[in-house]
Image (cartoon, rainbow, N blue to C red):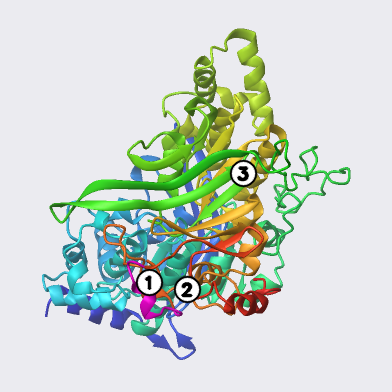
């Protein structure tokens, strides 16, 4: 008997069934935790009580800093010793109390009864080891057949071929599925998934969540899904536990918590969610709570004023006009192509990031660019910013000093050893602004992003995620740019922080009249922030049009799939099937045809015409199947259908 088989038997033995039903895989009672940082001790968990029965999917939901991840680390026995954790109460997992267990006991539980899936698989997978070997190591075997079985179980296509891939050669969704395969390799009783879909595209997110849900049916494990998004938890969870300031404030069946929440904090999480039905002419609602968990009374405000902002609401901002009344172009792309030479399986290969993009962005306009990872969104922004120069075609944009870019990971884009004040002054030095004038501009920049003066002496590592993103925005706008480029600036933030950043971007656009290109994989965000939406797939535009029209009546099958993948969406559109092809070898003809339910033989014709075609006022689609007489019926069927 090998250790993989022994682990299966151990899991079966410890997951006994009582007379009242399945035994609890995990039982937490009165759990307390304090951690120390820079000689300051903070209370992180305050008397947590929680139980996870066998075969249940429990969603643990809360904002950043609420204690979700440290709760998971406590159950996994992976608390950092450098933080000198002090624990109280109990956290029994598979019959072992992880509060009092020795390191050897915790290792045994992790090996035989627990699996873990973290937010970023690249930090968990060994970049120098092929994924097949990593899976077999987790299964305590050298048999490749075991890895192939596990990869098939988590819906990885062509597992025998993917077996020899390195992590960097896989898409984000496939990497996360490899993590799930390693997590279930020894048939765990409980899989702890900590924000496993936060930075994924909506289509890939839906696939990963479906994979997690299928595990309950195939191996009978329980799943603890940690997320800041109630919509994500609602897709797969049987029960939801809401955590606030280290305490569980509400638990119950998922439908009940979502439809009839009782705690003010749960209500605030629901109120902060961005959906396709939110009124985009008003700022997003951002709830704050008092220390006792109650929602404070909103301050009096004048009509048309953002809550707590003291400024008029950031409704749609019209693009500036030239003399003849047409929008003045600020950014123009014509047949833009960008190809990189990369190493693929030890051989040089061409990665086709952009394959002939034609796009015009008017002065003062906000354009959202959406699509899955690998569609070319970020490369397009980098070309406009002047960070990529190896492109062909025509690119007309303001000088580089008039363009600023805000990245997804503000912590990585801010110099770690510089304080916020030094970062802002550094930007001003490039424009030869010093002394009293620099101080005035810094004060104005902080006021625009609602940061206190005390932040000037703080380095990025000591800021919250929201503070880092605000500092990045202050730095980008302290000298107002003509073009602001935003690359997924809210995808890794919880709902309340994301709402604050989106409101801030709208206010900055209103105050500064800045042309904005906003890359996102979230169509609800795109609708809220943009006048127009451009949908990209494998380096090409497949649909462009007014934001409301693209969302309400998506014409291209790929756009429809993006809408269908939104958590909670109830639309009559088919979801995308399978994985996106690699930009190293995009399919001929329409690149989406291998996944498209409407595909015809001519869609694979490499000589076919797949240009953007008019569907209506300013609404273009690159699909000959729907760009004919059937378009009117398709659009009419979608009208009025809103998630």
Q: Position of residue 254 (x, y in %)?
A: 59, 74
Which residue is found at the position 65% from the left and 79% from the top? Answer: 637
First in sequence: mark 1 vs mark 3: 1
First in sequence: mark 3 vs mark 2: 2
Category of crowding for the residue at label 1, using alpha-carbon neighbours closer than 10 angstroms: few (below 14), some (14–19), many (at least 20) = many
Q: CA distance from mark 1 to mark 3?
A: 35 Å
Residue 104 colored magenta?
Answer: no
Residue 598 in view (yes/no):
yes
Residue under pointer 3: 501
Q: CA distance from mark 1 to mark 2?
A: 9 Å
Instruction: Quadrant for the C terminus, please.
Output: bottom right
The disc label shown at residue 119, or none: none
Callout 3: SS: helix
Residue mark closest to the camera, 3 vs 2: 3
Magenta stretch prevailing secondary structure: loop
Quadrant assignment, res 48: bottom right
| Residues in magenta, as a range | 597-607
Residue under pointer 1: 190
Residue 147 in view (yes/no):
no
Instruction: Answer whether labels 1 and 2 touch (C-beta < 8 Å).
Output: yes
Which residue is found at the position 49% from the left and 89% from the top? Answer: 20
Residue nearer the viewer, 211 or 502 = 502
Where 643 falls versus 583 (above or below)? below
Instruction: Answer whether labels 1 and 3 touch (C-beta < 8 Å).
Output: no
Q: Position of residue 216 (x, y in %)?
A: 40, 80
- 376 vs 148, left or right, is right
Residue nearer the viewer, 118 or 26 = 118
Residue under pointer 2: 52
Residue 599 colored magenta?
Answer: yes
Q: Position of residue 25 (x, y in %)?
A: 41, 75
Callout 2: SS: strand
């Amino acid at each position: 008997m090998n250790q993989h088989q022994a682990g299966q038997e151990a899991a079966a033995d410890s997951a006994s069934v009582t007379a009242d039903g399945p035994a609890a895989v995990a039982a937490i009672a009165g759990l307390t935790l304090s951690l120390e940082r820079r000689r300051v001790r903070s209370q992180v968990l305050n008397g947590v009580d929680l139980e996870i029965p066998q075969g249940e999917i429990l969603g643990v939901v809360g904002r950043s800093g609420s204690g979700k991840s440290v709760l998971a680390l406590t159950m996994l026995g992976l608390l950092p010793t450098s933080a000198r954790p002090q624990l109280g109460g109990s956290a029994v997992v598979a019959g072992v109390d992880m509060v009092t267990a020795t390191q050897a006991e915790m290792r045994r539980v992790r090996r035989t009864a627990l699996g873990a899936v973290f937010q970023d698989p690249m930090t968990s997978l060994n970049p120098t080891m092929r994924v097949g070997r990593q899976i077999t190591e987790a299964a305590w075997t050298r048999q490749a057949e075991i890895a192939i079985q596990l990869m098939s179980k988590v819906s990885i296509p062509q597992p025998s071929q993917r077996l020899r891939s390195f992590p960097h050669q896989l898409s984000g969704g496939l990497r996360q599925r490899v993590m799930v395969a390693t997590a279930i390799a020894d048939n765990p009783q409980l899989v702890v998934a900590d924000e496993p879909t936060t930075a994924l595209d909506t289509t890939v997110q839906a696939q990963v969540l479906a994979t997690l849900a299928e595990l309950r049916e195939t191996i009978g494990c329980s799943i603890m899904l940690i997320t800041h998004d109630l919509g994500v938890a609602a897709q797969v969870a049987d029960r939801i536990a809401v955590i606030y300031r280290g305490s569980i404030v509400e638990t119950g069946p998922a439908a009940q918590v979502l439809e009839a929440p009782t705690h003010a904090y749960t209500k605030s999480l629901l109120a902060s969610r961005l959906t396709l039905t939110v009124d985009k002419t008003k700022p997003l609602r951002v709830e704050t709570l008092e220390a006792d968990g109650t929602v404070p009374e909103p301050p009096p405000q004048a009509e048309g004023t953002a809550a707590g902002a003291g400024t008029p609401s950031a409704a749609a901002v019209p693009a500036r006009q030239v003399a003849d009344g047409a929008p003045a172009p600020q950014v123009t792309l014509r047949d833009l192509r960008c190809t990189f030479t990369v190493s693929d399986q030890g051989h040089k290969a061409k990665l086709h990031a952009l394959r002939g993009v034609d796009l015009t962005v008017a002065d003062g306009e906000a354009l959202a660019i959406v699509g899955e990872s690998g569609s070319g969104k970020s490369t397009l922004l980098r070309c406009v910013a002047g960070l990529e120069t190896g492109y062909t075609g025509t690119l007309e944009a303001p000088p580089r000093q008039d363009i600023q870019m805000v990245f997804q990971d503000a912590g990585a884009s801010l110099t770690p050893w510089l304080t916020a004040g030094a970062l802002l002054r550094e930007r001003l030095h490039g424009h030869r602004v010093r002394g009293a004038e620099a101080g005035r501009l810094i004060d104005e920049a902080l006021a625009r992003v609602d940061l206190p003066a005390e932040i000037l002496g703080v380095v990025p590592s000591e800021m919250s995620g929201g503070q880092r993103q605000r500092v990045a925005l202050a730095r980008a706008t302290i000298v107002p740019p003509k073009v602001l480029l935003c690359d997924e600036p809210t995808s890794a933030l919880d709902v309340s922080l994301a709402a604050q950043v989106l409101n801030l971007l709208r206010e900055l656009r209103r105050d500064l009249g800045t042309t904005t290109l906003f890359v996102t994989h979230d169509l609800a965000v795109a609708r809220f922030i943009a006048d127009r939406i451009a949908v990209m797939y494998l380096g090409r535009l497949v649909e462009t049009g007014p934001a409301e029209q693209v969302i309400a009546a998506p014409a291209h099958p790929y756009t429809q799939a993006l809408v269908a993948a939104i958590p909670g969406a109830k639309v009559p559109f088919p979801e995308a099937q399978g994985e996106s092809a690699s930009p190293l070898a995009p399919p001929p003809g329409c690149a989406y045809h291998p996944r498209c339910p409407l595909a015809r033989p001519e869609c694979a014709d490499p000589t076919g015409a797949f240009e953007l075609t008019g569907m209506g006022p300013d609404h273009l689609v690159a699909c000959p199947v729907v760009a004919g007489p059937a378009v009117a019926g398709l659009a009419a069927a979608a009208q009025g259908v809103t998630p």
